[in-house]
């Protein structure tokens, strides 16, 4: 399998964009990765903007102490809530600092902004948070998918196939470098 022995965290909060959480979750599972849905302490599940519910595997604080190869952050309204949780920001920073993949889509750029990991990096997002990313020091590009080393960003649901393909390729390349 493409991602056997890879551990991926997917952040969840209320009002996530359903496709932006479920499409990568299913695709990464299909590729053989171990997937863990991470939520805030005290919440067992979250409902997306369109009504799909996802169960949480562990809290953000538990996740911050795990060795993940990647973190996927879906958009929707959820990133505005995610960035308020110190545990989620710690998890994103720790994975980033270890050289893991940080993948975000749509409005999810707010989380890496709050984790202070976008300065000097090329990224994309939904246009409505372009200024937020630029003000945080990122170089925003108007493209469906932007990769800058281990940071992978996409603009929205239409870009999910390329987004998932890029995450898988990056994780495969990280495995090849370690052998």
Image: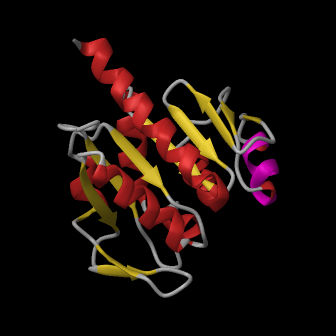
Residue 51 placement (x, y as % from top left): 48, 88
Residue 90 placement (x, y as % from top left): 38, 47
Residue 140 placement (x, y as % from top left): 77, 38
Q: The N terminus lies in which quarter of the figure? A: top left
Residue 40 versus residue 123 in the image, above or below:
below
Relative to residue 133, is residue 60 drawn left or right?
left
Most frequent secondary structure within the magenta stretch? helix
Furthest-left residue in this view: 5
> Residue at the spot x=55%, y=45% of the render?
163
> Residue at the spot x=82%, y=49% of the render?
131
> How many marks are shown on the rendered structure?
0
Check residue 82 for magenta coloring: no
> Residue at the spot x=22%, y=66% of the render?
57
Which quadrant would residue 70 be assigned to in this image?
A: top left
- Foreground: 169 or 55? 169
Which quadrant would residue 43 be assigned to in this image?
A: bottom left
For the magenta stretch, what is the residue range? 128-134
- Foreground: 4 or 154? 4
Residue 8 versus residue 149 in the image, above or below:
below
Residue 143 versus residue 174 in the image, above or below:
below
Q: The C terminus lies in which quarter of the figure? A: top left
């Amino acid at each position: 399998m493409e991602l056997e022995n890879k551990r991926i965290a997917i952040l969840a909060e209320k009002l996530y964009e359903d496709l932006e959480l479920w499409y990568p979750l299913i695709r990464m599972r299909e590729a053989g990765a171990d997937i863990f849905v991470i939520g805030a302490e005290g919440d067992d599940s979250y409902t997306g903007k369109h009504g799909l519910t996802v169960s949480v595997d562990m809290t953000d604080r538990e996740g911050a102490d795990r060795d993940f190869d990647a973190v996927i952050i879906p958009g929707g309204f959820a990133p505005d809530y995610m960035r308020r949780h110190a545990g989620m920001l710690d998890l994103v920073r720790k994975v980033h600092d270890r050289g893991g993949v940080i993948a975000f889509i749509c409005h999810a750029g707010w989380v890496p902004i709050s984790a202070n990991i976008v300065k000097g990096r090329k990224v994309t997002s939904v246009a409505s948070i372009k200024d937020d990313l630029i003000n945080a020091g990122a170089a925003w590009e108007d493209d469906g998918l932007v990769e800058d080393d281990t940071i992978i960003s996409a603009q929205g649901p239409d870009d999910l196939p390329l987004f998932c393909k890029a995450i898988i390729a990056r994780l495969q390349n990280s495995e090849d470098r370690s052998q």
